[in-house]
Amino acid sequence: MKRGMRKSVELERKRRYKKKKKRNMRRSLVYSDNDYSNGREPSDTEMLIEENAELKVIDFKTLAIATNDFSEANKLGQGGFGSVYKGTLRDGQEVQEIAVKRLSTSSEHGSQEFKNEVLVISKLQHRNLVRLLGCCTHEDEKILIYEYMPNKSLDTFLFDPRMRGLFDWKKRFEIILGIGRGILYLHRDSRLRVVHRDLKASNILLDEELNPKISDFGTARIFGGNERLQANTRKVAGTFGYMSPECVIEGRFSEKPDVFRCFRSVAARDCEGKEEL
């Protein structure tokens, strides 16, 4: 074998070894109790994470340390699917603030939201979508890790008279425009075509410069590239008061209700500073 060819074969062998080692390390984090090699069949959730190789897997112990054991002092909020905590990841000299969503272990909605977020957010990148940094599965726990938004959600500003005074009309217009750009990306420009189905002020997060980022894709619906963004469902998803009439009455959803929610339920609330009835 020629020297150059022998070197190429050796490099390829090393590359495969590193790839296999990395895959096994990932599996040890993904599969509960690290017993994937003992003949146990992986769960649907575990297989989903492994198939989405671009998504970082973070172990439970690291997240417990980052959130001070999920303390009340670190809690940012609580919803129907679980609680969100502020955390701090340390890697040498680097410090990163994160938001950790610990999904409810007693609700099937928590499992569905986990799958939806992994399927949707891990594959999409846009300046007006919140970024999913990683995930964690540990026994019955399902946890999602996001970039931390220091200004919390849009409703914090809109419905608090003291905070609302910080918004001038220029900033309000920029926020509405940013939400619209995020929706356009989801409906038309992303590699997945997505209907969010639960757009409201509490699901619009604000970064340090008050730029809006759409979050909470637990009830989102993914469509194929050539599939029409319209379908019928017996199970109505979303928040009443923020849903379009055809969705509530007929169980029909498409990209139009997302626009309805944005420019009636978010933009109108932005202008009026009133909560939806």
Image (cartoon, rainbow, N blue to C red):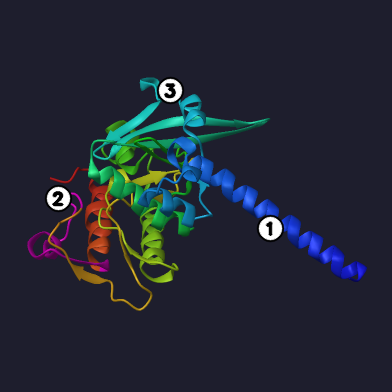
Q: Position of residue 99 (x, y in %)?
A: 44, 36
Q: Position of residue 67 (x, y in %)?
A: 46, 26
Choose mark 1 or mark 2, whichever is in front.
1
Give the Cα distance between marks 2 and 3: 34 Å
Q: Residue 69 shows which numbered tag?
A: 3
Q: Residue, x 41% and y 43% (percent of image)?
A: 206
Q: Is residue 231 left or right of residue 157?
A: left
Choose mark 1 or mark 3, whichever is in front.
1
Query: Which of the two labelled residues, at mark 1 and mark 3, occupies the earlier sequence position?
Result: 1
Between residues 139 and 125, which one lies in front from this camera angle?
A: 139
Relative to 256, residue 93 above or below: above
Secondary structure, mark 3, is loop
Please give the range of residues in magenta: 238-255
Q: Residue 240 shows which numbered tag?
A: 2
As drawn, which residue projects farthest toward the front? 39
Give the Cα distance between marks 1 and 3: 38 Å
Q: Residue, x 50% and y 25% (percent of image)?
A: 65
What type is the residue that disc 1 sits on? Arg
What type is the residue that disc 2 sits on? Phe
As drawn, which residue projects farthest toward the bottom? 226
Secondary structure, mark 2, is loop
Residue 129 seen by the camera: no
Relative to 32, residue 9 above or below: below
Query: Which of the two labelled residues, at mark 2 and mark 3, occupies the earlier sequence position?
Result: 3
Q: Quadrant of the C terminus?
A: top left
Q: Residue 16 shows which numbered tag?
A: 1
